[in-house]
Amino acid sequence: MEDDDIQPAGNMVPLALAVFGIVLGGAGLYFGLSANQRLNPIDETVSASQSSAAQIEKVINGFETQITELTAQLDEQSKTMNRLRVYSSQSEQAVKQLATELNTNREQIVKTAQKLNEFAEAGFRPAQARTVAETSSTGALVNADVSPAAGAATTYVIVAGDNFGKIAEQTGVSLQAILDANPDTNPRRLSIGQTINIPAK
């Protein structure tokens, strides 16, 4: 009888262990599912972070490319500025040289005008042959000596204020002789630069 009482107690231990194992298994399954649910958001966060990091890296690479391009453009602009400085310096030197040449030419023109005035004052004396060169409207020297040598004919270039009477007085040739030597010339319509014949005395 005593053996019968002890035997049921021995059969309870495996049963208790089985129940305990089932409880532990259920608890483990519960905790595993809970942990999986908690890890899924973390995985998603990590994936999102990796995606964001990739996008940030892409943006940074784009900035680096732009910086490289801007650096190249700045270098090119710097070279252009240096070339412009050189051109500006050369242009400034050319302008200074041109100004110097213009001043020199102006001085020469003033001196030439003074000499021409002196020639004009010395050459326009009545009742005398023109022995000093006169200046036409174009600045060319004409009529250096309009008094013909004896027995030789010459020519005369009309200047402002000339007429046959004045030319006859200056050359010492008679008015009629000058008219006869220029039958095709109208003495009332003489033009500056026109050439007439001066007969021999």
Image (spheres, rainbow, N blue to C red):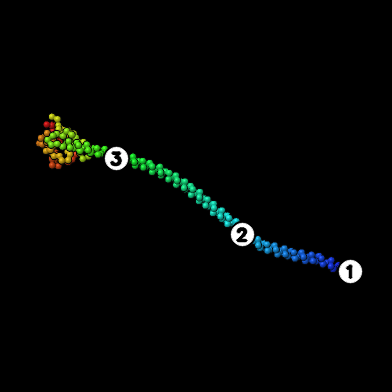
Q: Amino acid at mark 2?
A: Thr
Q: Quadrant of residue 148?
A: top left
18 left or right of 46 in image = right
Measuring 40% from the left and 42% from the top, which residue is drawn there? Answer: 86
Q: Is residue 17 above or below residue 125?
A: below
Q: Amino acid at mark 3?
A: Asn
Q: Are marks 3 and 2 in contact (CB under 8 Å)?
A: no
Neighbour class for label 2 at 10 Å: few (<14), some, many (≥20)? few
- Element type at mark 2: helix
- The Cα atoms of the two marked residues, 2 and 1, are separated by 66 Å
Mark linked to residue 108? none
Name the residue beneath numbered marker 2: 45
Q: Look at the image and tell me in which quarter the C terminus lies.
A: top left
Q: Is residue 68 above or below residue 109?
A: below
Q: Whole-percent x and y of residue 59?
A: 54, 54
Name the residue beneath numbered marker 3: 103
Name the residue beneath numbered marker 1: 2
- The label nearer to you, 3 versus 2, is 3
Q: Nearer the viewer, residue 190 or 6?
A: 6
20 left or right of 137 in image = right
Q: Whole-percent x and y of residue 176?
A: 10, 36
Neighbour class for label 1 at 10 Å: few (<14), some, many (≥20)? few
Label 2 vs 1, first from the N-terminus:
1
